[in-house]
Structures are given as structure tokens and as C-alpha cells.
Amino acid sequence: MGRPTDRRSPDIASAGVEVSVVLPAYNEAQTVENTVRVTVETLEWFLPSDAFEVIVAEDGCDDETPAIADRLAAEDDRIRHYHSDERLGRGGALERAFEAADGDTLVYFDTDLATDMRHLEELVECVRSGEYDVATGSRWMPENVADRPSKRGVPSRAYNGLVRFFLRSDLRDHQCGFKAFSREVFETLRDDVEDNHWFWDTEMLVRAQRGGFRVAEFPVDWEPKGDTKVDLVRDILGMGSQIMRTWWQLSVRPRITRRVTIVASLLLTVAALALMTLYIDPSEVLAVLSGADPTLVAVAAVVYLASWPLRGVRYRDILRELGYREKSGFLTGAIFISQTGNLVFPARAGDAVRAYVVKARRGIPYPSGFASLAVERVFDLLTIAGLAGVVLIGLAATGGLEDIATVLATGVSGGSVDVSAEDVRTVAYVASGVGVVAILGVLGIALSARADRNVVRAFVGRFSSDSYVEYVAGVIEQFVSDLQAVAGNRSAFGRVGLTSLAIWTIDVVTAVVVLLALGVSIDPVLLVGVSFFAVSVGNLAKVLPLSPGGVGLYEIAFTVFMAALAPVAPPAALAAAVLDHAVKNGVTIVGGVASMLSLNVSLTTAVEESADVRDREHELAESE
């Protein structure tokens, strides 16, 4: 890893330096010399000639900027060139330069000199005088609003509005590249600020206000230089995510304690059960439970519970292909927790919890955590799509397709059950579409693993011209390569595939036991075959996050196809669907709450441990 180097003579004295001005530079060959000379001249106007230094924080440039900065530093001892072999990001370059600076007043501004330099004295003296700890220029003060083109002004106002709303900042302009910090503020906050690019100075301003430091904002005359545009990757993926990350750390995390976590776990159980009543008649559920054989219901729960250690083993095997060796017991608990979250929240929001847990507890990077989860999901969908396809072939051979065509055209009704043909077709379309996408996805990943061409950077680059694209492209590349590591390895593919088949076979056996608990009596071969099809289609249908835990879609699919193909009376089919889903959700919730308590997954502790992991990774990178 290329490390920043200070290109100045080692015998230069720095005892008299009070003000350090840092100029972050990335490929600024056209402007850097003029900017440095104007900066020195302006500083000489109000400071003793030996009281300041100007540092060109050159951030992995690939143009003539390094050579120009070297020449300027050789000509004037007050000019320093701080070089990095690779990109650090604007925040990273500023932080490294401030760390190496000699002054107690740390200043930076953009090298395009968009802010009128007559404001430099006010910026410096706000902090140098001791009146304020932080000072920043503003283009959005009421008395001096900058005349900005709409393509600059509208995104800037939106961004600053979001920062004020979510992060409770009192400032009007967080992006103006014209800021000063005291050495104390920098040393106090530098370890807390996590962003190393465009959000770095915004986070410094927000944390300075939260830390009780005195922050001055004053109007500046500002004139846009060159062209700019809203950048999808930087402005939306980058800064948007950083705003939410900082909001979580400053406003949400401090309120979450172990007691809150335990209470939330109990409420999670109640909420999951309550949400089921939105889609299912509670009295019908009670009737099912009262009429079912409790022994066989308990057997169904035990059978389903047996699939969970297999889930942990499968996740262990997936992570092993990515280079991480973890115990299946811990991974089973992480899966329990994330699946419990998925029962309550729509859009599978609980999936992020698993990546969070393995990152905080085991230091597995987020891209690998999400990639491993994606691999698992792909194998799930591929397996149940395959099971449904095999049964469908069998139905075609025995004339069962006519029954499917009939139910698609007429729906299913009987007793208290009335499922319209439109709902049936919706389930069929969703299930078919998800199955096809799963198969195509696996084929695409496996084939791309054999190709040498890397299209990620080219694709992301179409949406962004900012240097932040390098970071985003790197994350996506790691995600894709992790997917390919499993899909492109025949041994791993087969091992994970067989485990997935065992998991979903147990899922179907659970449904069969539930049907037996309700007294359903039909040919065993037909019962098992139709159960494979009904359970598979139901699970494919609930993939779309139309309801928490897929409650509703699964019941419709299971009821329709059991009634049409077994045949089982519609009320009995619905009762089986309800009880089957209730048993599986109940096991998941109990296992999730138990895992939260046994693993002590307090979000406060997890975030702190995640920060420790990140620090260890940073130290390791520094030592390489």
C-alpha cells in the first residue's frame, strides 16, 4: 500500500508556524501553481512571513500535479508537498495532511479558488484568535445567497436540508470548501469521523456541534469555477448513506441499551404474531389449533427445527469459500436473528441484520456478508424452483396440468375459502418469474466467473465521473467476486446445493406432518408430491416483499394447489397452510429471540465492536 510522504527538507524549522493551510489536490495541474502562489501572497498580507505553511495534499494524481508541487516546495520553504501513491479520498488526504501539519490553526479550501480570497483573513482569525473552534464559509446565508445554477443550487439545498433535518445541524452550508479547525477539534474528532471522502468535512462540522465546540459560519462571496453535475454515485449512494450512517450513530445508537434490546425482542415476537392476523382470520387459526393433533404439531415443529443446523452448516460452507472459517453454531444464531427480523419488516429488511452481526462479531466485511447471504438466497430459489419443476414434469405426465389450468381460470372456493382467479394468477406469475430469474442468475454468475473481463467499473462509471466511483466499484467488485467464488467452484456448488436440497426437503416434510395433524387422508405418494409443489410455489411467491414474512402469499399458493391437485378440501388446505406457516414462524421467532439473548446482540455493543474491527483492519493495512 502506498503511504503518504512529506516531500520537504528534514531540517526545516517549524517552531514559528501558527497556521497550516492545506490544499487538497487531485489532478490539478492546470490550477495548482496559481492557487499556491495566490494563497502565499494572501497569507503574507495579514500574517508574519514565518507564521504559516501551505501544504499541497496531492492525492494520488496521475498528471503533472506532483512535479509542479515538488518544484514549488523547492522554491519556498513554507510550501510543502504531501504526496500519496494512491487515492485516499478528499477527507483522507485532508486528515493525513492535518496530522502532519505544524500549525495549531488548520485551514483548507478548494484549489479552484471559487471562494473570494479576501475572506481568508476572517476564516483564519476566527480560529487563530481563540474566539471559535471551527469556522466555515457559507454560500447560503440570508444576507449573501450565492448565485448558483439550478443544477448546482437545487442539489446543494437538498443536501444541506437533509443534514439539518437528520443530523440537527444549525449551519446552512456544509459543503463550502472553505473551513478552519483548531488543532484541539481535529485531534478530538478525527477518530470519530469515519468518512474519508466528500462527507468528511460535513461530519466534522456536525460532530463539532454535538461536541459543544464553538462553530462560526459567515457569508462569503463565491463564484462557480468550471462545470459540475449531480453525481449519482457520490451524491446519492455516497453522501446519502453517510447522512443515514451518522444519524444512526449520533441519534439512534445512544438510545439503545441491553434492556431496550431485550424489550424489543419480546415486542418482536408479539408484532410478528399480530401481523399474521392482518392476513388471516384469527378465529380460523384458533379453530385449526383446537382441531389439530398436538403431538403431530409438536413433531412438525421438531422436524422443522432440524433444518436450522443445516442452514448454519450451509452458511459456514459458503463463507469458507470466501476465506472465512466460522463455527456453524454461531452462524445458525445469526440466521435465526435475521429471519426473525424478516418476519416483522417488509422488503426483507432483516437480511441486513445478518451482515451486521457477522461484521460486528467476526469482522467479516459487509460486501462479503451481503454476498454470502445473496449466495444463500440464490441456492434457496434455485432449489425450490427445481423441486417445483420436477413435480410439474410429473404432473404433465399424469395429466395434472389440466387441474392447474382450471384453477388458474376459475380460482378456488369452498366453505369460508374464496381465492379469486386473479389472485391465483398473481401467485403463479410471481412464482414462475422468481424461479426463472433464480436459474438465469445462477447461470450468469457461473459463466461470469470464467470470464476475464471486468465490467463493474465501466458500468458504474457510466453513472458517475467522481473519484468516489473507485470506492463504490471496489465494493461491488468484491460482492460479485464473492458470488462467483461459490457459483464458479463445482465442489462448493455441489456441496451447498445438496445442503439446500436437504433444507427444503425438511421444509416440505414439515408441511406433510401438519397435513397429517389435521387428519388429511389421501394417497401418501400424491400427498408428498403435491406438498413439494405447493410448498415450493408458496415459497417462490413470497419472495417478493409484499407482506412481512410473506404472510398471505404463501397461504394462497399452498391452499390453491393443495385443493386443486391433491385434492384437499379448500378449508382444510387453508387450515394446513395457516398452521404450517405458524409452526415455521413460531420456531423462527423463538430461535431468533433465544439467539439475540445468547449472543447478546445489543446494537450498541455491535456497533462499538464493528468500529474496533474497522480500526484493526486499518492498522493492519498501515503495517503492510
Image (cartoon, rainbow, N blue to C red):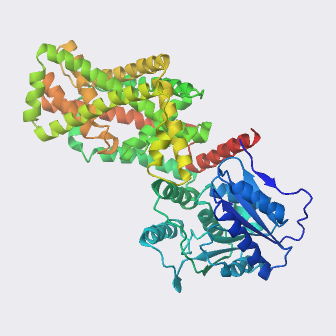
Is residue 348 visible from the viewing direction of this image?
A: yes
Task: Identify the residue at image location x=69%, y=44%.
Answer: 618
Expressed as whole percent of the image width and height from the top left, the position of residue 364 reads 59, 37
Quadrant in which the C terminus appears: top right
Task: Identify the residue at image location x=38%, y=22%.
Answer: 303
Expressed as whole percent of the image width and height from the top left, the position of residue 243 reads 52, 60
Task: Identify the residue at image location x=24%, y=31%.
Answer: 432
Q: Compared with residue 257, is residue 390 higher up or lower down, i.e. above or below?
A: above
Task: Identify the residue at image location x=41%, y=17%.
Answer: 498
Q: Quadrant of residue 19?
A: bottom right
Q: Compared with residue 471, is residue 538 higher up or lower down, i.e. above or below?
A: above
Q: Quadrant of residue 395?
A: top left
Depth check, front residue: 247 or 144: 144
Q: Is residue 380 left or right of residue 50?
A: left
Q: Is residue 75 left or right of residue 137?
A: right
Expressed as whole percent of the image width and height from the top left, the position of residue 46 reads 78, 82
Q: Quadrant of residue 561?
A: top left
Q: Compared with residue 280, is residue 448 higher up or lower down, i.e. above or below?
A: above
Depth check, front residue: 451 or 403: 451
Depth check, front residue: 290 or 271: 271
Q: Compared with residue 302, is residue 223 higher up or lower down, i.e. above or below?
A: below
Quadrant in which the N terminus appears: top right
Depth check, front residue: 415 or 68: 68
Number of marks in the rendered image: 0
Expressed as whole percent of the image width and height from the top left, the position of residue 590 reads 43, 36
Q: Is residue 354 left or right of residue 420?
A: right
Is residue 419 visible from the viewing direction of this image?
A: no
